[in-house]
Image (spheres, rainbow, N blue to C red):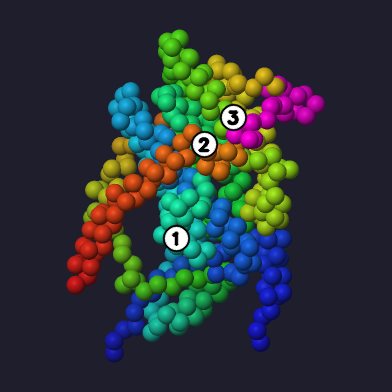
Amino acid sequence: MTVTEAELTEHFEATIESNDRVEPRDWMPEAYRKTLIRQIAQHAHSEIIGMQPEGAWISRAPSLRRKAILLAKVQDEAGHGLYLYSAAETLGTSRRELTDKLLAGTQKYSSIFNYPTPSYADVGTIGWLVDGAAICNQVPLCRTSFGPYGRAMIRICKEESFHQRQGYELLMTMMRGTDEQREMVQESVNRFWWPALMMFGPPDDASPNTAQSMAWGIKRNTNDELRQKFVDMTVPQAKALGVTLPDPDLRWNSERQAHDFGQPDWDEFWAVVKGDGPCNAQRLEHCRKAHEDGAWVREAAAAFALEESR
Amino acid sequence: MSEWPLYEVFVRSKRGLNHVHVGSLHAPDDKLALMHARDVYTRRNEGVSIWVVKASQITASSPDEKDPLFAPSGDKVYRHPTFYDIPEHVPHL
């Protein structure tokens, strides 16, 4: 007796309904598989491209301590990319296919990494705000409906805590320094605040995929819910740090028991997503060059393995 | 009589969790290894999925290498969040 697609669908939906996890060998609707591959790949690519803005400061870090920390952090991002690519591969795609799509520009990565890092304070701001926003996004993803993705997120979240704390500590140190250093921190926060809010994606009414992703248990919260949570968590941290978040509309709303805040420039967001951000071309070009420059290492490793097996 | 090969057995106790190594067994082939694993290791609903793999197919680090292999991560205390002093009054960090 063959099982009909209707029965398979029913079984899949029952798994989702009971809040159980879908595992790689389970039957799943093609659209669920495709959505997951797209989301996990985009997430993995973000980790890989995300090494660049901070990586630029490794050779110029102001002390050996800061350099070691930054190296460790960028190394973590590479590891996170690997966990996520591995999770994507359980869905029947391959690492090579995903890399090709990243380099061809047909799969996206988070728009935040298309902003430049002209100041050393940006290393701290990225840890505090960008990794802080990433944590807000990622904590609920530990409960995502696809098992391998959730397990990758659990490992990643454990490691992100170091990233955020080192960033905040770096900024605290600069805030205890000279006026010039304090200005550097404020200037950096001014540049990164809005792009960090954009990391949660477009507003709910402009996010057509959210409803389906939530019905499938891939996403657990809407973009606007997570953005609100991030703002509410960040405001007291900004106050403790002594910086101003550059939003004139930001204020506590005691009725809602949450902060009201302004909207990012969504036209800018869409322009960056579509490739017109300040660093889109540079990021992809760098990634392509690194990939090509590394070809001899891959070839040498394969040749060595072949030789050893003889 | 030549002995059946040794298989290592991994069981996923619940959807969402990793397969965990539970033990090993001998079997003449992959298929029977899976059946035996079910019979031996999941008699009381311990699992929802089983992996078996020939022990000879596993590449493992050796206990003698433990120090040189893992020492490099020992002195990198800055990889841990607790390395950073954040005042108590700063929330959610």
Q: Residues within 10 Å of mark 3 (few under 14, many from 20)?
A: many
Count of numbered circles in the view:
3
Q: Residue furthest right?
A: A255
Q: Amino acid at mark 3?
A: Trp
Q: Is residue A151 above or below residue A127?
A: below
Rendered image: mark on residue A194: 3
Q: Residue at x 58, y 38 (%)?
A: A271
Residue to which mark 2 is pinned = A277
- Mark toward the viewer: 3 or 2: 2
| Left or right placement of residue A263 versus residue A293 in this view | right
**From which residue to which does the magenta span run?**
A250-268
In the rendered image, residue A267 lying in the magenta stretch gets the answer: yes
Q: Is residue A152 visible?
A: no
Q: Residue at x 54, y 72 (%)?
A: B42
Q: Position of residue A205 (x, y in %)?
A: 73, 43
| Left or right placement of residue A195 versus residue B25 in this view | right
Q: Amino acid at mark 1?
A: Glu
Q: Position of residue B36 (x, y in %)?
A: 47, 80
